């Protein structure tokens, strides 16, 4: 099927003007090449967003400029709305998915490796960093019975977090507004969300104004602490920054992977032995180049598949998961982090209510977020419909296999975003990797031969919009059947645009009777032109992969 993508409307920053001590930003809405009427002010040329962020302030309130959009301080409101999850003092579950609003004391792996249902993600930051806010971070491995469990090395050893000033903003760091309700009714200490381990607070206010201070532990978990006599619900409105390299470093250092081994907390001997044995199976050893180590391990753990059949149980859950290559985000991040720690690479496991990912320390740079994917049937971003999506300024320096590009952390099948937004992009920070692919046949191609295998899947696209504007939804529906025409329920269905490469728009599941149907957002910065609509499935334990003809 041929889909034609047209130019859509976009907002473009045209100029910045100064008149005395007043500052205004002119935005022109319209097509490329639209002209603006010249205002009678002095033109200030070539200001970058970071410089504008320093200038845009009125009456003590401030705003930041992100990708040409002015983002004001979050409004002061009372208790939590329906799309918020207050942070509370009660610990979360240490098994599997974390409870929204809570910090888990540890992470104990499980063997539930199947595709998960739609997950809800509570948005805290603007620009939106879904699904990557930091709630629980673990930097040590301890044995819980016979199971290697991730913990915090010294949770009670904390340092105070000092609030700086918006004037301390730096061009090498990105800024994020935050708004969250802190529920101290169950205790005087509640987790405080963060963007990165090296984040700083540039402004912080509480509504109502009560004495609260922030601190963080050795794994850079942020915590809010209130006087025991003031236990109540309080809203925190804050400006937090993060170094640009955290989202994607421009280059992975070519240094020995164990050069910062002194930053790694010792592993239990058995765990280290197992992890080094597994690393050797991938031809990695301590002392190998860090960039090559991360390339091999990232490719391996990003290539996991979700499966209702977990790896064979040998009694060693780390080796079973690492070798079996089955599981969702938490299984991938668990094996990845333990393997790196055994090699002498400082690494951390991070999770929130919707996702788990890793942080890796790069010498002379700092921590970098490493997402390993891990799909669910979808992600519902709550409270995100009025927020722009954050884009890393550097491309992902690590391998991106197909199974990783199909995960919800890469933007597939995400609802609740602002109209025209997508978690994936063609920009510098895009997770999209253009692929040299042959052009798929169009819908008027000769019919394929009648399938004969009992494992064969037939995908028929019954409806697919032939023309669409950038930033607008593309509706696709159809049916998945076996060779006898019987509908197949529960198949993963991937929808792509193919032209100069392949762009994954989203993922859905076939329902009763094998029918599927979904609207997928077309990225607003996609190059206009003709694309082939490609619908495919990776198959399952009972069926082979297939794509529409």
Image: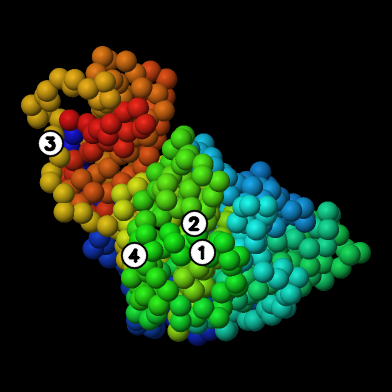
Q: Secondary structure at mark 4?
A: loop
Residue that carries the numbered disc 4 in the rendered image: 283
Q: Are marks 1 and 2 in contact (CB under 8 Å)?
A: no
Badge 2: residue crowd in 10 Å (few <14, some 14–19, many ≥20): many
Q: Which mark is residue 335?
A: 2
Which tag, 1 or 2, sits closer to the chain's start? Answer: 1
In space, the residues marked 3 and 1 are separated at their CA atoms by 50 Å
Residue at the left extreme, as displayed: 446
Alpha carbon separation for disc pair 1 and 2? 14 Å
Q: Nearer the viewer, residue 404 or 390?
A: 404
Asked if one can make out residue 78 in the rendered structure from this viewpoint, the answer is no
Residue sticking out furthest to the right = 229
Distance from label 4 to label 3 (Cα)? 40 Å
Q: Which residue is mark 3?
A: 441
Q: Give the quarter of the image for residue 535.
A: top left
Between label 2 and label 3, give the one nearer the viewer.
Answer: 2
Q: Residue at x 36, y 22 (%)?
A: 488
Quarter occupied by residue 534: top left
Which marked residue is nearer to the observer: mark 2 or mark 4?
A: 4
Q: Nearer the viewer, residue 398 or 147?
A: 147
Left or right of 543: which side holds 171? right
Quarter of the image with the C terminus is top left
Q: CA distance from mark 1 to mark 4?
A: 15 Å
Of circles 1 and 4, the one toward us is 1
Name the quadrant of the N terminus: top left
SS for callout 1: helix
Q: Position of residue 286 (x, y in %)?
A: 42, 74
Of the numbered discs 2 and 4, the one sitting upstream in the chain is 4
- Upstream in sequence: badge 1 or badge 4: 1
With respect to residue 235, does 542 lie above or below?
above
**Numbered label attached to residue 273:** 1
Q: Give the residue at x 23% y 56%.
A: 434
């Amino acid at each position: 099927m041929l889909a034609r993508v047209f130019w859509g409307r976009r907002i473009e920053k045209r100029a910045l003007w100064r008149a005395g001590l007043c500052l205004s930003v002119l935005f022109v809405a319209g097509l490329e090449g639209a002209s603006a009427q010249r205002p009678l002010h002095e033109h200030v040329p070539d200001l970058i967003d970071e410089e504008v962020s320093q200038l845009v302030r009125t009456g003590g309130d401030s705003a930041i400029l992100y990708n040409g959009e002015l983002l004001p301080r979050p409004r002061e409101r009372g208790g939590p709305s329906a799309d918020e999850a207050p942070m509370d003092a009660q610990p979360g579950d240490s098994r599997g998915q974390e409870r929204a609003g809570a910090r888990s004391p540890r992470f104990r792996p499980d063997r539930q490796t199947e595709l998960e249902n739609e997950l809800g993600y509570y948005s805290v930051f603007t620009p939106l960093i879904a699904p990557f806010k930091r709630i629980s971070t673990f930097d040590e491995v301890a044995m819980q019975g016979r199971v290697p469990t991730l913990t915090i090395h010294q949770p009670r050893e904390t340092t105070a977090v000092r609030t700086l000033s918006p004037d301390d903003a730096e061009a090498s760091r990105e800024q994020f507004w935050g708004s969250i309700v802190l529920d101290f009714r169950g205790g005087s200490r509640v987790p405080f969300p963060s963007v990165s381990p090296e984040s700083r607070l540039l402004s912080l206010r509480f509504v109502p104004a009560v004495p609260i201070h922030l601190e963080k532990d050795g794994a850079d978990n942020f915590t809010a602490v209130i006087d025991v006599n003031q236990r109540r619900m309080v809203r925190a409105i804050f400006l937090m920054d993060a170094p640009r390299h955290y989202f994607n470093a421009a280059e992975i250092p070519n240094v020995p992977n164990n050069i910062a081994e002194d930053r790694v907390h010792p592993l239990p001997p058995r765990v280290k032995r197992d992890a080094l044995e597994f690393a050797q199976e991938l031809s990695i050893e301590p002392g190998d180049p860090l960039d090559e180590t991360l390339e091999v391990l990232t490719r391996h753990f990003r290539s996991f598949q979700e499966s209702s059949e977990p790896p064979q149980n040998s009694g060693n859950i780390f080796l079973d998961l690492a070798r079996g290559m089955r599981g969702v985000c938490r299984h991938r991040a668990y094996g990845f982090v333990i393997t790196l720690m055994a090699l002498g690479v400082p690494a951390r496991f991070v999770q929130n209510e919707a996702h788990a990912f890793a942080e890796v320390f790069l010498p002379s740079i700092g921590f970098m977020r490493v997402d390993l994917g891990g799909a669910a049937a979808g992600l519902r971003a709550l409270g995100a419909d009025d927020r722009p999506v954050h884009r890393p300024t550097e491309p992902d320096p690590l391998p991106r296999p197909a199974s990783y590009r199909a995960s919800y952390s890469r933007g597939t099948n995400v609802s609740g975003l602002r109209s025209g937004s997508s978690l994936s992009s063609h920009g510098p920070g895009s997770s999209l990797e253009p692929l040299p692919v042959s052009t798929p046949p169009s819908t008027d191609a000769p019919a394929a031969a009648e399938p004969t295998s009992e494992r064969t899947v037939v995908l028929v696209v019954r409806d697919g919009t032939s023309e669409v504007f950038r930033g607008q939804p593309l509706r696709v529906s159809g049916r998945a059947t076996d060779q006898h025409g019987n509908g197949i329920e529960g198949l993963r269905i991937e929808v792509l645009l193919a032209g100069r490469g392949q762009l994954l728009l989203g993922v859905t599941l076939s329902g009763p009777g094998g029918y599927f149907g979904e609207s997928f957002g077309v990225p607003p910065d996609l190059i206009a032109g003709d694309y082939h609509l490609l619908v495919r499935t990776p198959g399952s334990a009972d069926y082979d992969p297939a794509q529409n003809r």
